[in-house]
Amino acid sequence: MVALTVIASFALCHAGLVALSLAMDRHYHQVWRRHASRAQRQLYRLGGVLLLLVSVICAVVVWGKSVGAVAWLGILSAVALPLIFLLPYSPRAAFGSGVLGAAIGLLAMAFVIF
Amino acid sequence: MKNAFRQSMSWLHTWVGLLAGWVLFFMFLTGTAGYFDTEIDRWMKPERPLVHASMSLEQMIDVGLKRLQAVAPTADRWFISPPVSRENPDLRVTHRQAAADGKPARNGNELLNPQTGAPVQTRDTGGGQLLYRMHYDLHYLPNGAANWLVGVCSMFMLIAIVTGVIVHKRIFKDFFTFRPGKKQRSWLDAHNVLSVLALPFHLMITYSGLIFFMLLYMPVIVSANYGKGEDKEQLFLDAAVGRADVRVERAGVPAVLAPLGPMLAAAEQYFGDSQVRFLEILNPNDRNARVFVARQPPGPLRNTEQLMFDGVSGKLMQIKDPVANTTQAVRDVLLGLHEGLFAGPVLRWLYFLAGLMGTAMIGAGLVLWTTKRRAKGAEHFGLRLVERLNVGTIVGVPIGIATYFWANRLIPVEFAGRAAWEAHALFLAWGLMLVHAHWRPLSKTWIEQLWIAAGLYSLLPLLNALTTDRHLGVTLRLGEWSLAGFDLTMCAIGILFALTAKTARQESFSSATSESNPLRAPANSAPSI
């Protein structure tokens, strides 16, 4: 159970960051070769923030408030680094990894909750 | 006005970063290795038993107690740490006796085989602990000089972090930005990304690092409030760490120590199962004996809850709160965050990764200094020197650390002074790489040293298999993950170095045509640092 929640925290954090990057025109253009509309950007931003929030909650559930905060900052660094190197070399894969992250994270959470 | 400020901050960032860069690189890398000090120690002492006997806590503590009674019955303090956590993979006993009546201080520290009660015989090695201590004692320097040098470099680091944040105008806009294949621009992006992503870690580790030696760096604050002299300093320390209430003098009347079993049982009931971290026995074999049972750290607060028992009657006297006062708690949390002793496996790897990012950030910053000047067509002695020092340090220090591990396996076990020579091997290899960097053409130096590092790291598991019976074939089968993890991690690091070497070679071949690199992202701003 704990392992699944840890996985959810990592996966959702990654998905959240992918969404937040797509909320920026530079990276949206990198992935889709066209510009994002205002609504799209806001949707990605909202989705990204929500995913990150759930990821934080998962970390706090596993480690408690104080250690959870430390761990989550570490998770953020750990998942952001590969994303940043993936974006220029293979932007579509970066997007795909975000979708995969969201799917794995939500599935893991579903297992934990139900 | 604003730009002038930013420019002066940029100047400061560049020069404090460069001056302290190489020492900081060494500090960050050896410190990062320190997050796995126990695992490295384990690997470097292959004689230690593979599988631990299943014994009760009380039995193990009893083994430790017997040993201490035999070797140091008159000590001021005994410590017994049972092998219940990562921090203590073996039964460890420690005794301390301060210098008094013209007799010198007597301290000792032993690992015991819990089954036989005899000290574990291992090869003479500094192990993971020595490697970890290098990041603040710099090995060859006398303590005072090392602590001051480390302090100055840490202060420079703190300045570099703060000025870096000021100079980097687009922290959020460039949060996800890395533009490869563009020389200076790419190095700047890499430096920025590595800095920003782990910024909380960099700030925490640097600031808390300074806190470790705060009494050394700012002694006047203590002497202004408490007066001068060692006893006054002790007064301050007692108040600061909340020890004042338990400073009990020896009565001088011999007394038999109460059985520890009931105390351990009481502690386990209070803390929970497997939560006993260590036992401290103050004034053993005296009427004023006190037994402290400490709890495992549940979080970054470094001090933990302790139960204090009367060592003769065995009665519980006090439950010591880990927080004596707010100041002590703040310091404790900062030091605890720095050391990360509370971290379980996942958090420990995250610490390790953040430490590597810090190391890489410093490396990228150092390289950026040179590429920026090369791009402007500069060519002078200082630039060449920095370029050479960069290769010889950025790849040379990792090569030195790998050599330290090789030396552990290759120096014969019976060789006198082998522990010292393991450490010499580290610095000799580093020195050799610096010399090599001054002889060869620059682009060749990078590639050659990267390949040397790749070879040294990836072949370590093989060397281990040839020289010990603690190799992957055995450790994987038995599920000894701390030993197997070392071999696997070394192999992975070796592969990373090989990939970097391959990339570096392609870069140096394609540098003439890099302008047509299809992976380039559109440029839209001038470098800001």
Image (spheres, coloured by chain):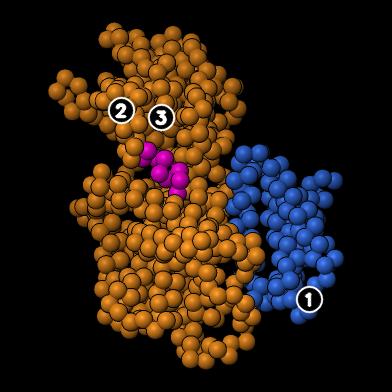
Letter of the chain shown orange in the rendering = B
Type of amino acid at the residue the image marks with label 2: Ser
Q: Where is residue B433 in the image (x, y as percent from the top left)?
A: 30, 71
Q: Nearer the viewer, residue B474 or B330?
A: B330
Q: How far apart are marks 3 and 2 (CA)?
A: 35 Å
Say whether mark 2 and mark 1 are on the same chain. no
Q: Where is residue B301 in the image (x, y as percent from the top left)?
A: 52, 34
Q: Which tag is nearer the camera, tag 3 or tag 1? A: 1
Find residue B197 and name its label. Answer: none
Q: In this view, does B163 lie to the left or right of B288?
A: right
Q: Nearer the viewer, residue B113 or B518?
A: B518
Q: Where is residue B377 in the image (x, y as percent from the top left)?
A: 39, 84
Q: How far apart are marks 1 and 2 (CA)?
A: 64 Å
Judged by its main secondary structure, the magenta piece is helix
Q: Which chain carries label 2?
A: B
Q: Mark 3 lies on which chain?
A: B
Chain A shade: blue
Find residue B80 and name its label. Answer: 3
Q: In this view, does B118 lie to the left or right of B274?
A: left
Q: Is residue B160 left or right of residue B343?
A: left
Q: Is residue B57 visible?
A: no
How would you rate the neighbour count of disc 1 (Cα within 10 Å): few for under 14, some for 14-19, many for 20 or more?
A: some
Q: Is residue B212 magenta?
A: yes
Q: Mark 2 points at which residue?
A: B223
Stretch of the chain drawn in magenta = B206-214
Q: Nearer the viewer, residue B297 or B11?
A: B11
How would you rate the neighbour count of disc 2 (Cα within 10 Å): few for under 14, some for 14-19, many for 20 or more?
A: some
Residue shown at 83% from the left, 62% from the top: A43
Q: Mark 1 points at which residue?
A: A35
Q: Which tag is nearer the camera, tag 3 or tag 2? A: 2
Element under label 3? Answer: strand
Q: In this view, does B83 lie to the left or right of B220?
A: right
